[in-house]
Amino acid sequence: MKKSDIICPNCHAGYRRVELASGKGTTGEFRCLLCDHLLEVFDGSTEIAIRLTVQPEKTFL
């Protein structure tokens, strides 16, 4: 199992990424839950889980 962090370059939301090499995953992609920016494309070779951990504060003008 590998753990790492992902920061969205667009809105700076923080995510925890966990990869399990022992399981076969699914193909697809992961987009930021806050701004819909593409963060990762999955090839299905491993099982990957991503969870939002840091939600940046929104600025109201």
Image (cartoon, grey):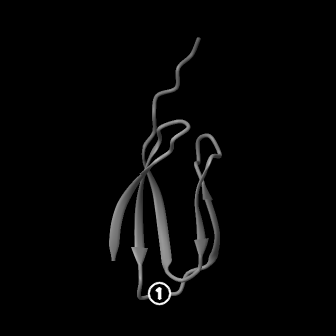
- Image quadrant where one finds the C terminus: top right
Q: Badge 1: few (under 14), some or many (20 or more) residues near its Cα, within 10 Å?
A: few
Under circle 1, the secondary element is loop
Count all numbered tags in the image, as a single digit.
1
Q: Which amino acid does the dot numbered 1 rest on?
A: Gly
Tell me the quarter of the picture where residue 29 sits: bottom right
Image x and y of residue 53, in percent? 40, 48
At 47% from the left and 38% from the top, the residue drawn is 12
Image x and y of residue 4, in percent? 35, 61
41 over 24 or under it: above or below: above
At 47% from the left and 87% from the top, the residue drawn is 23
31 over 27 or under it: above or below: above
The residue nearer to you, when weighing 49 against 42, is 42
18 over 23 or under it: above or below: above
- From the viewer's perspective, is 25 left or right of 36? left
Image x and y of residue 36, in percent? 65, 46
- Residue on which disc 1 sits: 23
Image x and y of residue 40, in percent? 57, 60
- From the viewer's perspective, is 59 left or right of 38? left
Tell me the quarter of the picture where residue 45 sits: bottom right
